[in-house]
Amino acid sequence: MGPSAIRYADLSGALDAAGVESVDGGDLEVVRREATGDAIDESARFLPEIEDVCRRLAARVRESHDAGRTPLILGGDHSVSIGSLAGTAADDEDVGVLWLDAHADFNTPSTTPSGNVHGMSLAAALGRDEFAGMPWANAPGIDEENVVWVGLRELDPGERSAIKASDATAFPMSTVDERGMYDVIEAALAAAGEDVHVSLDLDFLDPNEAPGVGTPVQGGATYREAHAALEAVAKRDCLRSMDVVEVNPVLDEHNRTAELAVELAASAFGKRVL
């Protein structure tokens, strides 16, 4: 339902207004939750179904790049980013990652408290721990030192330890409070490099701004801070590909979160007031 809500909020019109010629590639068919039965592995719930979708998504992302386009992936939960990253950094493209999210999504099956794969997306793409044996999930063109989080404010214990031990860079919201979003996003993009995949989870924003998300966390980015972050991406002209995920219209208020997702995607692709 998330991608449908974003389309309904006139994503194509917003991209047109940004001067972008957009082509809607349609949906990938995804098995419905109620048709799957119980998860086989509670440490990585529904991983076979997620693998199937992400393999097909990775192929579509590569096709988009081959056609000279910039892939914009609309997802339900953040597990789709495994396919996005595998497709956009399939070889040695030297791709950076800007992860705009309240959560790090850096768990593995051995550290997760929930078994939800959307909390493991970035760890999977980097081939951490158990994911090293799952080549379908890995994005070989991404180095840990070019991975940057902005907006973190809720971490599991295993993630906190893994982030501290990694070569990636993390800017929690407390750092945004201290330094301001513009300064933080400039530092983040410098660390990510010249060719960047942006993964935007709408819970990056405060729930007062974006209520329609599955795992809201108080104290997130404001409306203007979020736009400043995505406008900086466009200004730097570094956008290789982008995810927009975790819009849940069942939890939304009058499609506010989907409309905000559209605005932010348009900002990343260059929409300006002047």
Image (cartoon, helix red, strand yellow):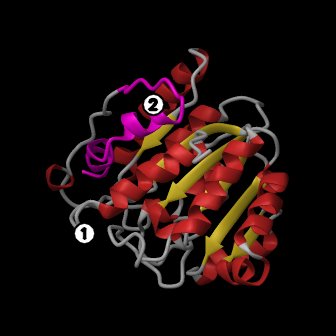
Say what secondary structure mark 2 lies in.
helix
Q: Which amino acid does label 1 sit on?
A: Glu
The location of residue 188, given as percent across then percent down, is 78, 60
Q: What residue type is labelled 2?
A: Asp
- The boundaries of the magenta stretch are 1-25
Residue lying at the far front of the rendered structure: 274
Name the disc covering residue 16, or none: 2
Residue 237 highlighted magenta (yes or no): no
Residue 141, compared with residue 161, is above or below; it is: above
Q: How far apart are marks 2 and 1 (CA)?
A: 26 Å
Residue 35, compared with residue 228, is above or below; it is: above
Residue 142 or residue 44, whichever sits in front: 142
Quarter of the image for residue 177 reads: bottom right
Q: Mark 1 points at which residue?
A: 253
Determine the residue positioned at 57% across, 33% down: 87
At label 1, counting other C-alpha atoms closer than 10 Å, the crowd grade (few under 14, some 14-19, many 20 or more) is few
The location of residue 11, given as percent across then percent down, is 38, 40
Determine the residue positioned at 27% across, 60% down: 255
